[in-house]
Image (cartoon, rainbow, N blue to C red):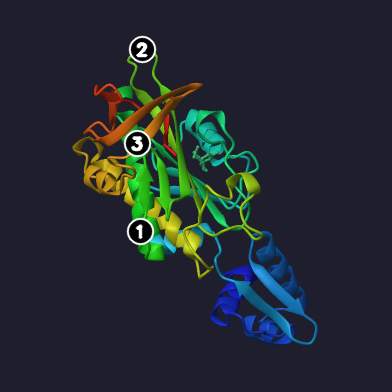
Amino acid sequence: MAVKDELKALLEEHRREFLSGAEIAESLGCTRGAVWKAVESLRSEGYKINAVTNKGYCLEDTDILSEESIRAYLGKTEGLDITVYRSTDSTNIRLRELAEKGAPEGTVVIAGAQTGGKGRLGRKFFSPEDTGLYLSILIRPDMTAENAVRITTAAAVAVAEAAEEISGRQADIKWVNDVYMDGLKICGILTEASFTPESGGLEYAVVGIGINVYEPEGGFPDELKNIAGAVMKKRSENDRSRMAARVISGFMKYYRTLTENTFLESYRSRLIWKGEKINLISGNMITPATLIDVDEKCRLLVELENGEHKTISSGEISIRKQK
Ligand code: BTN
């Protein structure tokens, strides 16, 4: 095992305790210089290691997002190729590049921060460092465009279930793909697909999931303050890795049975604003309606003001509650 990995194990074993450089060097059978180099290398991976003169080194924060810790929570899931970046422009962009080069289904790109996180409808997705989880999963389903909405809705269910399991709080879904807790958005999903021109079938889809696991230090920026929330109230050990593992395995489980709609009951039971007045928003057009439910194709069922019932596919439409 490399000195870096041995040091990580030792510091994790003595979490929040100071160990002197000499103590560590003796225990690992290396020089103090090698200890310092290993500390620097772990820091560059995002580990927060405090160094204090006459006291030594101490691992402060143990919520580390790494392939190793994610795999530890994934258990025996096979066929996943996971890459974790400390920061990247957008995990969807990274994964689309891999998809175009022929990467197989089950390739996953994860980041602890994004400098160009993409949201739906051309918006940006706020992706600060150290508090969120940004992940994209590549799938190559044998499926028509019409059925593709199920991919996103299944992902929303996987996130809601993971967030509930880890936080013990209830998670709701706003059609089509936003996950909420206590009325605040904790996750957004952007699925980007490539279609085969001849058949119109899906060549691949990149399912991009952004989760606010913790509130950023200093809170969310003003424009998100009343909209965005976080899954966890306080930091705890490996929550982001646990969340990543739970979301990936939950999504893959539903994905394997996508056409059987195994996720639909869970989706419906979490759907917010049922029976309430909403606005359907498409560009500048706002249409008032009452939200009824979603159908078996995950289309939104609404009643318009003239009493007409309408079925809406996700496309460019978003919904907002009437004030
Ligand atoms: C939305 O709420 O509008 C969708 C947001 C989707 C954000 C995720 S974060 C991981 C992946 N990479 C991106 O650039 N976007 C998605």
Q: Residue furthest left?
A: 260
Q: Amino acid at mark 3?
A: Lys
Q: Amino acid at mark 2?
A: Glu
Earlier residue among tags 3 and 1: 1
Q: Residue at x 30, y 33 (%)?
A: 290
Please identify, in this view, whether the residue under mark 3 or under mark 2 is nearer the observer: 3
Residue 89 position (above or below residue 7): above
Disc 2 beta carbon < 8 A from ligand 1?
no
Q: Is mark 3 within 8 Å of ligand 1?
A: no
Q: Residue at x 42, y 37 (%)?
A: 322
In the displayed image of the protein, which residue is found farthest to the top? 198
Q: Which residue is mark 2?
A: 198
Q: Residues within 10 Å of mark 2 (few under 14, many from 20)?
A: few
Task: Tell me: 59 left or right of 133.
Answer: right
Give the residue pinned by disc 3.
277
27 in relation to 200, above or below: below
